[in-house]
Amino acid sequence: MLNGKTALVTGASRGIGKAIALELAKQGANVAVNYAGSEAKAQEVVEEIRALGQQAIAIQADVANSESVTNMVKAVISEFGSLDILVNNAGITKDNLMMRMKEEEWDSVIDTNLKGVFLCTKAVTRQMMKQRKGRIINISSIVGVSGNPGQANYVAAKAGVIGLTKSTAKELSSRNITVNAVAPGFIATDMTEVLEDQVKEEMLKGIPLARFGEAQEIAALVAFLAGEGSGYITGQTIHVDGGMVM
Amino acid sequence: MSDVLERVSQIVVDRLGVDAAEVKLEASFKEDLGADSLDVVELVMELEDEFDLEISDEDAEKIATVGDVVNYINSKN
């Protein structure tokens, strides 16, 4: 259980991030719900968490902006008095074929999906080092392991997150801070809903469990990695993908 | 000066578990006091709290000895 713990979940107004925020709250954590633009949706998540009996705040920040991230982390610590769990979930896609990908499409995806993880991790490390305890969970993607046509920027960022996870795990291990990555496969969310049916059917053929995943199935693993039972796991990337990549 | 040294010394003793007699001005955190890079980062964090300062990353990278810390803090006061 996560009673008395404080969690910060980035990109938590919808999709996988929302499921993670709610699951951590169900297990007893107080949760800071970060969002970039969807204030109303973030506020709904906050209300749901409060209904579960936990404390929650919605907090706006662009994870790719260091000042914005520093202010967010300060605000979370001043609100809750600690910061025990960071879930780096915020992510965007700007898919395009390599040949057609604009520099701006590359930069913005790398900035949010990779630099954002670096900035948030850096910002919470001070508090976690002082506490001599912490859990950092980075949401990567199975395509960061396998590659995917049309997603050079997203794949590069998600593969980068796996490397960043390993380096951070090694640097912070002596301070009892574990850092792990979760690599979701095809999860039914707003982000994947936009794909064409034909693409979806093609993907299903590559999934041994023959179905798409649910956000809740990612949240369950994140909650485990955030808890006491995972204390001997660090630097790992755990696939939650119905067996897509083995 | 002596007061700053005393307070710095106390933090170093607590953090690195060394004998107070070893914490001389010329003592290097890494060479003489057994600190690793992360220990130095933590020392800087504690010094910031103790002396109510913000030490920039650039300045923190220049800190190698106990004397560097004492001089830095005196220069800010």
Image (cartoon, rainbow, N blue to C red):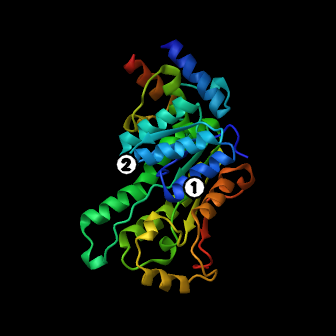
At horizontal 60% and vertical 39% (from top left) the residue drawn is: A50
At horizontal 49% and vertical 84% (from top left) the residue drawn is: A201
Q: Is residue A3 above or below residue A24?
A: above
* Label 2 sits on residue: A37
A134 sits to left or right of A160:
right
Quadrant assignment for the C terminus of chain A: bottom right
A59 sits to left or right of A235:
left
Q: Amino acid at mark 2?
A: Gly
Q: Which mark is residue A19?
A: 1
| Mark 2 secondary-structure assignment | loop
Q: Amino acid at mark 1?
A: Ala
At horizontal 42% and vertical 45% (from top left) the residue drawn is: A40
Q: In x, y percent, where is residue A30?
A: 61, 39
- Judge whether residue B53 can be spotted in this image: yes
Give me the chain letter of mark 1.
Answer: A
A241 sits to left or right of A157:
right
| Mark 1 secondary-structure assignment | helix
Residue A168 occupies quadrant: bottom right
Q: In x, y percent, where is residue A159?
A: 47, 68
Along the viewing direction, whichever of B53 and A3 lies nearer the viewer: A3
Disc 2 vs disc 1: Cβ atoms closer than 8 Å? Answer: no
